[in-house]
Amino acid sequence: MQQLAPSPDAAHDVPVLELSGITKTFPGVKALNNVSLDLYPGQVTALIGENGAGKSTIVKVLTGIYQPDGGAIEVDGASVQFRSAEAATAAGITAIHQETVLFDELSVAENIFIGHAPRGRFGLIDTAAMHTKAREILGRIDAPFDPSTPLKDLGIASKHLVAIARALSVDARVVIMDEPTAALSQKEIEELYELVDRLKAEGRAILFISHKFDEIFRIADRYVVFRDGEHVGAGLMADVREGDLVQLMVGRAVDQIFPERTHQAGDEVLRVERYCHPTEFDGINLTLKAGEILGFYGLVGAGRSELMQAIFGITTPSAGQIFIEGEARSIRSPADAISNGIVYVPEDRGKQGAILGLPIFQNVTLPSLGRTSRNGFLKLAQEFTLAREYTERLELRAAALDQNVGNLSGGNQQKVVIAKWLATQPRVIILDEPTKGIDIGSKAAVHAFMAELAAQGLAVIMISSEIPEILGMSDRVVVMREGLIAAELSRDELSPEALVRHAAGIGGDQT
């Protein structure tokens, strides 16, 4: 695909969409306070901010899910109101979310045209016309699959292409991309960048939401920064440095993201011997000491999460043994793992880590009901006390502890999940991509807390795909490749080159 990346010029200096004075209040929280946002044709505007800054709320205002309490929205200089998602779509605004909202049981073409399929006689869906149009759109974005393909047969990157094709099917003038690269491989990310360049060349305005500064500087033309529901900065990417954006985001300089750690690891807490699974991993041996952070690195499909899910009892290994403080233990369920002091914070916090319809305090205390009940009756005051202790330690941002977790930002949902398991007072905590999808300020808070836990003697396993996080937080690193341990590296042996070389199976002695 040819790289097409036009620079901002005079023809693109008139915004297609303008928001001014937008305010949105929820009970106890002012999510947006007099914010503004301009989007320009043929340009990418990066929306930057910590979790809880108001990014998700402004996207829901743009797409007609929320109606603002005050302010104005203009399209091509004309005042508009988006009373529904359909009204926003009719105005040419569409969103592609981090977790694509698609239907696995439908075909690609049906997903592209759901809600606006071409009609034939008697108002029936014209399937032939739908497939013809879908094939034309997929060809424009170089999608390597047929419109008749069932969506469930596609991978994550291909599903993102379907979501983009759906945006193009309504001739979207404004495309919102919310953390679109979170679950993609590096090759898939590069292909997405090329697609963004193509959309720019077609004159579409793109709002790009990401916590990854490298990709923001790679593809964005402009930036807008929100902090605590307020607009605190905007300008051209060419005129700003990373440090300037960080300071705008958090209201302070973040010079040292990774905390200094000087304590020594203690005695062995966990030992895994000859752990095997028929399809996911084989012959795994590892040890973990008190006060140690053991990093796990590998490419997509290396088997890291699958191994941890087996250690936590979610899946059953075909062979192998677990030892806790030198004593063999049988772990065949999460309940067994928890009773042995092992807890697991999953990568997919929305589906596996939290109950989004329950309030914060009930999520935090759910695995610890023995500590907050008496004679079979829950003690509400004790639940709140326990939840407050751990959410305050993690600097949770919420209006109140009885706020539903589903109303929190992604980073704060992650903190609730971590708080839930820490409240069980474990000996081993497994953190699967603990800072995925959260902002730099929240990352610093999670890293500091991880260091604090290790200093208190908790044994920590951290799975991460971010090389700086692996380098900055790990005492040792296990590198996995295709279900096997490819290398175990001490802190002195760590380098980006060594991690990538072992993860990819590249030969050579350079580290």
Image (cartoon, grey):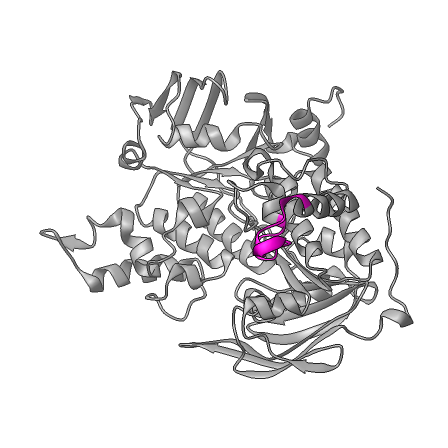
Occupied quadrant, residue 298: top right
Residue 330 in view (yes/no): yes
Depth check: 316 or 257 in front? 316
**The N terminus: image quadrant:** top right
**The C terminus: image quadrant:** top right
Occupied quadrant, residue 155: top right
Secondary structure mostly seen in the magenta stretch? loop
Depth check: 387 or 14 in front? 14
Instruction: Let me know if residue 331 is in the magenta part.
Output: no
| Outermost residue toward the right in this view | 10
Residue 211 higher or lower than 290, as above or below: below
Residue positioned 22% across, 50% down in the render: 369
Q: Position of residue 503 (x, y in %)?
A: 65, 27
| Outermost residue toward the front in this view | 122
Instruction: Let me know if residue 127 is in the magenta part.
Output: yes
Residue positioned 69% across, 22% down in the render: 505
Q: Position of residue 151 (x, y in %)?
A: 57, 39
Q: Which residues are magenta?
A: 112-128
| Outermost residue toward the left in this view | 375
Residue 395 higher or lower than 287, as above or below: below
Residue positioned 36% across, 23% down in the render: 322
Is 434 positioned to the left or the right of 421 in the image?
A: right
Residue 268 in view (yes/no): no
Is 302 positioned to the left or the right of 18 in the image?
A: left
Depth check: 204 or 245 in front? 204
Q: Position of residue 138 (x, y in %)?
A: 73, 44
